[in-house]
Amino acid sequence: MGGTPAGGDMSKAGPEAGDEHYEVVIIGSGLSGTLMAARLGEVGIQTLVVEAGSDATDNLDAFHGASIKIPSAPFPPRVDGPGRDLSDPSGEPVGRPVVLSLNRESWLDPRQSYYIQSGPLPFASCYERLVGGTTRSWMGISLRMLPSDFRMRERFGQFTDWPIDYRTLSPWYDAAEVALSVSGEAAEQSYAGIEFASGYAYPQPPLAPSWFDGEVRRRLSGLQLDGIDVTVRGTPSARRSRTATGAPACEGSSSCIPLCPTGARFSPLTMLAAAQKTGKVTVASGWVASRLHMGEGGMIEKVSLIRSDASGLKRQVRADRFIVAANAIESVRLLMMSRGGGNPEEGLANTSGQLGRNLMDHPMLVSWGLMPEPVGAYRGPLATSGIESFRDGDFRRTRSAFRTEIGNTGWNFPIGDPDTTTLDLIRGTNCSGLNPGHEALAGSALTHRLANLLSRQFHLSFELEQSPQESNRVTLSDQCDGLGLPRPAIAYDMCAYTRAGFFHAADISAQIHAQLGSIDFTNRNSTHPASIDIGPDAGGRPRRVRYFGAGHIGGTFRMGESARSSVVDKWQRSWDHRNLFIVGSGTFPTFGTSNPSLTIAALCLRTVDHVINEWNA
């Protein structure tokens, strides 16, 4: 078998060393890569996990010193420099997108934005590049996709169908919920065609609803909008609701993004540690995969790696099978840098011409309001319930579906509270809209006003299904990172189907605010570059709303029934290269409305089981 022993440190090997050889090489150490590595290690398959980013631990000092407390703040490299400006991605060996690069001044500036964007709209979702990936700072929401999400063309005449259906994936959802220690209740989640095996129970009981969840449930009870019953349901979450041996339970912190203070939320680092304990899994952090090399018969024979420091080290690693698990953008970037496949101008695994196309997200409409009395704002975790009533229906023939997440963090997400309102009341400004008299307060007057205002805040996030569009795509730009590798170029827009969903979500939001008796502070005439026109309101006034990225990036190497129209098959195996698997939400043909992590996990557990069965055949 040869090569670096399991648990070894590739960074200590010199450039003169021979090629390592492993049975499996996994590129990317996020949710997909760690789940698959752990399973491969369990059955004794020698596996190398390659990660471009560092294995740095969470850095609270960096988080506390950051100018804005974004999810990237605790992780290296620092996203803001001495003058609080964004670091130049051309000088970063492991560049990454951050939300600070999406404002009017920076989203089209290659000196600030890692993405090289051409629009017409900004792509507004980001990710981490470090050991554990973006799941180091995720919310933990673990919803199943609906049966209809897999059959959009069959049911509604839209888009395409998956090569698998809900029933095929259902036992793997069960396995994924066990792997992630998901809390929930099967009876509450049995809606819109979702079925569970007889007697099935989630690994953890459901999280307790927040005080505000109960208020929303009570005030919306019996409400129908557009003929649909508005129902509040608990949200399944990959965090422990009860303490186990050596494993703490969730304590309800509302600041658990980016860091869970108790460790109750599932972390890929735990899974990766378990993989390494098998003695069969090596983790090589700080190595950037720059090219996959194709050999005879279209088989991938090795990967070229570059050390992400000033050493200049380069390596090549051979394997019997390769799994690309970088994410829906970085995986495409690697495959496109690996020219020489069936479509040599656009990289490996691309005889279909679909590689990089159909980029999707869950663009979000966020609305926020002030209740007439305190509702327990800033008591978490971030979201414990949602309104799932508009995830499905015959309306999907003409407009997108959405789910509504009930936020427990006041106005933190939309405007950065409690900081923004606090500064307004100290300085006499009115950025929040809560200080129209421009009062400058101090002492008990300040604390009393803050206690009154902050405790009454809430927000709702409407996460919309996005259409797969071939013109929404990832390619390679002529701008490079600090290693001289091309950065991702992104073209992004929203079609009429998705925009119609925004129009409907805005109307539903207004009706919910009216039913709750809240004052709606949502900005309906945004000038932010990530804004779209959604048509006039009931009074004929134009509406332009800002959309937010959900951090759910997918669709760029879709699975399908044919090599002519898809990049991978139902096992997430490349049609063009039999020993290459490309995994993650990039394989989703359609995106539905559920956060993708649980479906990513279910698909990857199914795929790795298939790999193992082939190995033993």
Image (cartoon, rainbow, N blue to C red):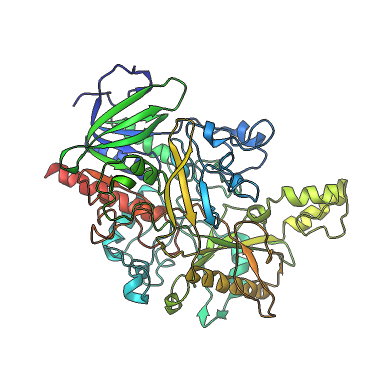
Regarding residue 76, the answer to whether it shows in the image is: no
Regarding residue 385, the answer to whether it shows in the image is: yes
| Residue occupying the point 59% across, 44% down | 109
Closest to the observer, 457 or 205: 457
- Residue 264 vertical placement versus 372 (above, below): above
- Residue 442 vertical placement versus 513 (above, below): above
Location of residue 514 in the rendering, given as x and y in whole percent from the top left corner: 67, 75
| Residue occupying the point 58% across, 35% down | 88
Location of residue 509 in the rendering, given as x and y in whole percent from the top left corner: 61, 71
For the C terminus, the image quarter is top left
Location of residue 134 in the rendering, given as x and y in whole percent from the top left corner: 47, 44
Specify whether 189 is left or right of 510. Answer: left
Q: Residue furthest bottom?
A: 227
Closest to the observer, 360 or 51: 360
| Residue occupying the point 36% across, 75% down | 157
Location of residue 276 in the rendering, given as x and y in whole percent from the top left corner: 33, 31
How many numbered dots are placed on residues in this image? 0
Closest to the observer, 485 or 252: 485
Specify whether 50 is left or right of 458. Answer: left
For the N terminus, the image quarter is top left
- Residue 228 vertical placement versus 313 (above, below): below
- Residue 84 vertical placement versus 551 (above, below): above
Q: Quadrant of residue 2?
A: top left
Specify whether 396 is left or right of 436. Answer: left
